[in-house]
Image (cartoon, rainbow, N blue to C red):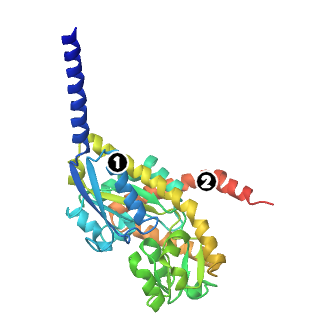
Amino acid sequence: MKRRQFIRGAGAATVAAGAMMSSKAMAAPEFKWKMVTTWPKNFPGLGTGANQLAEMINKMSNGRIQVKVYGAGELVGALEIFDAVSRGTAEMGHGASYYWKGKSTAAQFFAAVPFGLTAQEMNAWLYQGGGMELWEEVYDKFGLVPGAAGNTGVQMGGWFNKEINGVEDLKGLKMRIPGLGGEVLKRAGGTPVLLPGGEIFPSLQSGAIDATEWVGPYNDMAFGLHKAAKYYYYPGWHEPGTTLECFINKEAFMALPEDLQIIVRNALRVANQDMLAEFMTKNNQALDQLVNKHGVELRNFPDDVMIKLREISDQVVAEEAEKDEMTKKVYDSFVQFRDQVQKWTAVSEQAYINGRSLG
């Protein structure tokens, strides 16, 4: 009997020891990845979103993947991350796909399209409407696997050093605005300028640019943009539901076992949802401070300006679609989805919000 107890006890000890060894083995990093971002280090919402994504992957994988985040300029420049991940200098990149229109015209559609999809509609297109499959097709030739990793919701129209009372006020305007929105501004007579986040404030303050869009009150106040411009316009016609991205070097991703691939993909989905919730929660808190504490003048774009920008936007987006076969393929999918989903939005979200505002 004693012998049996000893054997039983020895067996239990062996199993426990084995479990401990297994746990330690699981915790040891099998893959050490670098994530480069277009955002300043630890910048609220965007930079911290990248940090949280990395931490989530580390924890969900039980340490088997360890991701270290590098802010803009720490490892490569803010607008150099696409190439860095493509060539394998880093395994992950965190940014927005409209920055890469020079690489692929089609890439812009996966971030924001002027007068396009809201955040909710954008997620529906990506996850259920075929958008993600097209995104993967576009990035595949660059050796990248893309994924949605956040959304800002409807952005603000931007900061201006002069009033916008009509379409004429857009002429000659030097404005930091990327992607398709920048091309629309150009057609309206302005001069679009592409700048990474860290260069916006000094450029606006020095007069190198007359206006800038960034994101919304939460992010804009963190940059101190209210110290460099007086007028804050809405709505963000150019970015109605901007998707942030995380792209992964395809060779590095395929080297992961299947369970870790699933963990990475699901971590992106959680990050996408969390960022949108963060912006929805904090934007009005920041807007209240900007208006009531800092004296910012909140302005709505005049109707004639919005109508003209919408007209130009339709032309620009349609013309962009004709530049190559892949862009046309993405455009057709995007427009088809937009046209059907906005009918439901009109009788659901829009009708409800209109009704809530009555009285």
Instruction: Left or right? Give the position of 158 relative to 199.
Output: right
The answer to whether one can see residue 67 in this image is yes
The secondary element bearing badge 1 is classed as helix
The secondary element bearing badge 2 is classed as helix
The one nearer the camera, 282 or 247, is 282
Q: Quadrant of residue 296?
A: bottom right
The one nearer the camera, 278 or 254, is 278
Amino acid carrying label 1: it is Lys
**Category of crowding for the residue at label 1, using alpha-carbon neighbours closer than 10 angstroms: few (below 14), some (14–19), many (at least 20):** some
Farthest residue in the right direction?
359
**Category of crowding for the residue at label 2, using alpha-carbon neighbours closer than 10 angstroms: few (below 14), some (14–19), many (at least 20):** some
Q: Which numbered disc, 2 or 1, marks the residue that appears first in the sequence?
A: 1
Give percent across and percent down for residue 285: 61, 67
**Residue drawn at (29%, 56%) of the image:** 67
**Residue drawn at (53%, 75%) of the image:** 221
According to the picture, the residue beneath numbered tag 2 turns out to be 345
According to the picture, the residue beneath numbered tag 1 turns out to be 59
Q: Quadrant of the C terminus?
A: bottom right
Q: CA distance from mark 2 to mark 1?
A: 37 Å
Amino acid carrying label 2: it is Thr
Above or below for 241 versus 270: below
